[in-house]
Image (tube, helix red, strand yellow):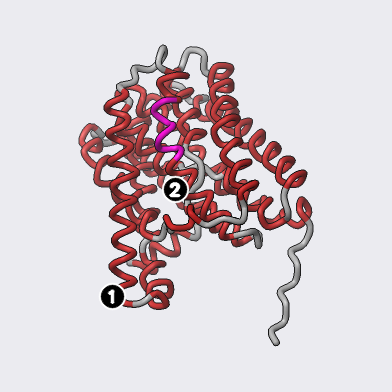
Amino acid sequence: MLALLMKINKNLILAIPVAMVLGFGFGLFAPVGWLKSLIVPLTFLMVYPMMVNLKLSKVLEGGDLKAQALAQAINFALIPFVAYALGKAFFPEQPAYALGLLLAALLPTSGMTISWTGFAKGNLGAAVKMTVLGLVLGALATPLYVRWLMGAEVPVDMGAVFMQIVVIVFLPMLAGHYTQKWLVARHGQAAYHKEWGPRFPPFSTLGVLGIVFVALALKAKDLVAQPGELIVVLIPLLCLYAINYVVSTVVARSLLPRGDAIALVFGTVMRNLSIALALAMNVFGASSSGAALVIALAYILQVQSAAWYVKLTDRFFGPAAPAKAGG
């Protein structure tokens, strides 16, 4: 089972579209109302495993303050407003889609921030710190941004949103932190990194695929009634990611050394779509399925674009310095 999940985790480019197609087919031919009861357990399955390997202590380490400040400025002073403007331009009569676009933009960084930074030979320490900071700041800022930017178009119960943030982000974060501490104390740091740590992320992937399946099943009949809807949603998503990549690359190349620059790109372009999807499905009532569709499609763009960006990293930032020989 674990081996299969790890294989799926390495092939999200294929796995997420397959889950979408299966969910769409299920939604056309089977009753879907009962699927809503799966949202909370799937949310926990999605969020908790990715929190276990999060290193909260990294936030206190110094050495890359400029990169961290630039990353959070892009994440919270620029990208949410780009997403809001795109939502206004493309979805003036469909606030649920605009909400999905905004949620995708408000929760930066995920485990993939660290993975892609590693693949591109960037500064892993800076990426870990951006991941923790982005997650905490995003969790605190999201209810305020949604109320401020979308409150007139989408009913926003601030208490419900904050409660969901606690349940979806902070409780799993604490549970993950203490799970990691317990496993390290019981088995040692080396065994944790080699044997135990890698076992958790694949279960998060299972939760993601489950939520994507549910989101598409709930939206299937609407999509059949309006078959051009997927294209309508994809265009502003493409614009959002293109703007994000261009801005982050220009800022990173201009102001940071190679390792920090790569961490900044993946610390700003990779969004925590798992938590965005969980929020969309759990909080926003009638808007949930529309917002979830936007976020589900964002998964495909995010994984595909990151894979291509890694291949182009040396062209943007030059080759990595060769490792020094021991001696």
Helix, strand or loop for the magenta stretch, by majority: helix
In the rendered image, the quadrant that contains the N terminus is: bottom left
Gap in angstroms between the C-alphas marked 2 and 1: 39 Å
Displayed quadrant of residue 77: top right
Q: Position of residue 202 (x, y in %)?
A: 39, 60
Is residue 139 part of the magenta span, yes or no? yes
Up-down relation of residue 207 to residue 288 (above or below): below
Up-down relation of residue 291 to residue 133 (above or below): above
Up-down relation of residue 302 to residue 216 (above or below): below
In the rendered image, the quadrant that contains the C terminus is: bottom right
What is the magenta range? 137-144
- What residue is drawn where x is 51% and y is 46%? 109
Q: Where is residue 58 in the image (x, y as percent from the top left)?
A: 48, 57
Task: Report the number of numbered marks.
Answer: 2
Q: How crowded is mark 2: few (under 14 residues within 10 Å), some or many (20 or more)?
A: some
Q: How crowded is mark 1: few (under 14 residues within 10 Å), some or many (20 or more)?
A: few
Task: Give SS at disc 1.
Answer: helix
Is residue 44 part of the magenta span, yes or no? no
Displayed quadrant of residue 193: bottom left
Residue 186 marker: 1
Q: 9 or 118: nearer the eye?
A: 118
Q: 158 or 34: nearer the eye?
A: 158
Q: Which amino acid does label 1 sit on?
A: Arg
- What residue is drawn where x is 58% and y is 22%? 86
Displayed quadrant of residue 287: top left
Task: Give SS at disc 2.
Answer: helix
Q: What residue type is labelled 2?
A: Val
Q: Position of residue 254 (x, y in %)?
A: 77, 44
- What residue is drawn where x is 39% and y is 24%? 222
Residue 326 marker: none
Q: Mark 2 points at which residue?
A: 18
